[in-house]
Amino acid sequence: MFGAWCPGEDVAKLAYYGLYALQHRGQESAGIAVSDGTRIIVYKDMGLVAQVFDESVLSTLRGHLAIGHCRYSTSGASVWQNAQPTFRATPSAGLALGHNGNLINTLELAAGLSAAQADGDGGLVHPAALKGTSDTDVLAALFANPPGGLAPGGLGDAAFAALPLVRGAFSLVFMDEKTLYAARDPQGFRPLVLGKLARGWVVASETAALDIVGAAFVREVEPGELISIDERGVSSRTFAPAQPKGCLFEYVYLARPDTTIAGRGVQATRVEVGRTLAAEHPADADLVIPVPESGTPAAIGYAQASGIPYGQGLVKNSYVGRTFIQPSQTIRERGIKLKLNPLRDAIAGQRVVVVDDSIVRGNTQQAIVAMLREAGAAQVHVRISSPPVTWPCFYGIDFATRDELIAGRSSVAEITASIGADSLGYVSLEGLIAATTVPGERLCHACFDGRYPIPVAAAERGKHMLEDVRS
Ligand code: SF4
């Protein structure tokens, strides 16, 4: 997610490069909204940023204000209607909205909208209130119909009135014709940062996107903060007290290694986790290899701390996307085989420690162990730089149900047997938290221990809840 307010700059291109830097956060669809101060144009489609946009499309997106989004679906189907930015016309202005995260009171908000529009058909969601079937559409409808009606202050005041009603994970960039806005939920589950350009401002999901567009990091958008950016500069309002619970999984997997969270580089955290992993789960082995790319820093740390040589043993096809982030099991399974190939000369006859960032369903690790054995590995010891993922996430990662999580239904010994490894070791939750240097009480680690920072009602737990309600 990316936003730019910068007169005199080609903001659509800035958004394009920003999204390019953030492609890892969502690969299903991409979109950019741009305004020249009088009207908003949105262009979005299914696919990667580079598939959706080319020079000719970007050249039609003129203005000084833009937001961009690449989607990874956790609410609503992966279809064009749910691609972002979401656009709505409100009585006073246009609204384009990009959302990273996942709301946990989507149905409650939709019911409130329905009640507020009592002339509707009495259904849970007023048909006119939503354009798509995602929590983001509910959010856009709420901003267009805030409690107490549209205020004279326009979209900023509408969002300020509506945001305290919204629960769950939401890092937002949104805009009307003249102003760029950014907001972050009180827990700050997902990252969001503010950067400065010579002639303007940018907001982005990760600091790496600031680097790519040449913006200087200013600060994180605070949990519970709404900021507005226009020709008067940046102004800030607090819509709810901060109760920080940043996502621990950002450090493990989601964020780029060259991103900084809470003042610490993600790469440094991951290397440190690898060192801890070596201390907690040593192995008698000849070679440490990563599952590229997200296992690489922890493998380096493991090799440093254990003294076992580090090497490359698996080659990744960089043009294949992340495997568990894809929307269907069929695509995920094919994706694993497309993605990795062993280096037989490096592996043959070696006792190998292979370091990966996480085990979700177990398909990837089973395939990797089999690949390494076929390549002649004498032993395969799997080390994981996160604790077992035993609980689903309701705050913006689609781990699906507990039953689909291999660690939710199997012991470590059973998983070791199921993936075919000689041994398996996960870093401890304490070890992972210590490596972030953030106090554990300021982090969400619910997928590892089931302690959800905000409770989630059973009815609010389905990815397709709005589609189910409509059908
Ligand atoms: S449950 Fe896990 S993945 Fe979800 S926000 Fe919390 S730490 Fe992150």
Image (spheres, helix red, strand yellow):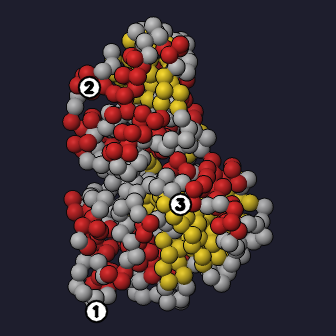
Q: Amino acid at mark 2?
A: Ser
Q: Is residue 279 visible in the rendered structure shown here?
A: no
The residues bearing labels 2 and 3 have C-alpha atoms spaced at a distance of 37 Å
Query: Which is more N-terminal, label 2 or label 1?
Result: 1
Query: Which is more N-terminal, label 1 or label 3?
Result: 3
Q: Are marks 1 and 2 in contact (CB under 8 Å)?
A: no
Residue that label 1 marks: 119
Residue at left 30%, top 49%? Answer: 400
Residue that label 3 marks: 30
The residues bearing labels 3 and 1 have C-alpha atoms spaced at a distance of 35 Å
Q: Amino acid at mark 1?
A: Asp
Residue that label 2 marks: 418
- x, y percent for residue 288: 50, 17
Which callout, 1 or 2, points to the residue nearer the camera?
2
Q: Amino acid at mark 3?
A: Ala
- x, y percent for residue 405: 28, 40
Horizontal arrangement in the rendering, residue 285 relative to residue 30 (left or right): left
